[in-house]
Amino acid sequence: MPKILMPIGDGTEALDTFYAYYRLPEDDFEVVVAGPEARLYHTVLHEIPPDSSVPWDITQERPGYFIEATVAFKDVDAADYAGLFVSGGRAPEYLRYDQDLLRITREIHAAGKPIASLCHGVEILTAADVIQGRKITTVAKCALDAEQGGATYVDQKVVVDGHFVTARTWHDNTPLLAEFIKMLKAQ
């Protein structure tokens, strides 16, 4: 069964992560969750509350489920994976400094393997310097991150450019995974 690498850390967005975690095996792909260390991590829920008496300008963060990383980034061999799925949340803010994760991302990119990213996942792609000249989408508040990485940001549900497929937020999970699975099966 081909393996898909899913990098996570504390603050990974629950819906970004768990939708792909459970959807990919339905098409015979094994999801391998990796983190800075092999251990249990906290996910979070990000949402602008629709009924708050005091409006929120940004997403509110609440605790989500736990997810276990079974391998540390330093122990990942990118050649073992058919693709990379980068979820969002706050985790990419600090994961983008992990040199082993950046190495893995660059190696998967250099091999032309499918890379899916949504929401704040673009921060990892920008730090790995793999999106120059690409057209991508992400959550609007990360448009600057995409542009700083040399990409052209567009506000669409899903964008496919070469071996990249990107989406804005967990609201776009279904079309993102449909495109990602098509790319994986075409290899």
Image: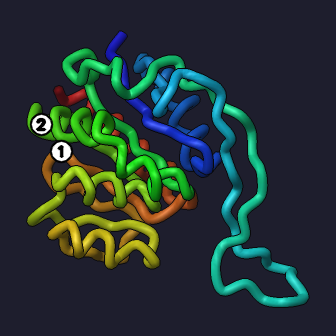
CA gap between label 2 and label 1 equals 6 Å
Q: Is residue 15 left or right of residue 142?
A: right
Which amino acid is tagged 1? His
Q: Nearer the viewer, residue 52 or 127?
A: 127
Q: Which residue is mark 2?
A: 112
Which of 69 and 19 lies nearest the eye of the viewer?
69
Do labels 2 and 1 touch, CB within 8 Å?
yes
Query: What residue is at 34 percent from the left and 45 percent from the top?
Result: 116
Give 175 or 7, whichever is nearer the viewer: 7
Residue at image coords 32%, 71%? 145
Q: Quadrant of residue 51?
A: bottom right
Against 30, residue 134 (above or below) is below
Amino acid on which disc 2 is placed: Gly
Residue 79 in the image: x percent, y percent? 19, 19
Residue 87, image x and y in percent? 47, 47
Question: Can residue 86 be seen at all in this image of the molecule?
Answer: yes
Q: For residue 26, say whether it is visible.
A: no
Q: Crowdedness of circle 1 by 10 Å Cα count: few (<14), some, many (20+)? A: some
x, y (%) of residue 127? 26, 56
In the rendered image, which quarter contains the N terminus?
Answer: top left
On screen, residue 35 versus residue 101, left or right, reads right
Q: Report the residue at 66% width, 44% height from top.
A: 43
Task: Please give the residue where the numbered disc 1 appears in the rendered image.
Answer: 163
56 is higher (above) or lower (below) than 77 = below
Query: Picture coordinates of residue 158 (x, y %)?
Result: 36, 61
Quarter the C terminus occupies: top left
Q: In the orientation shown, which residue stands out farthest toward the right?
A: 53
Image quadrant where residue 114 sits: top left
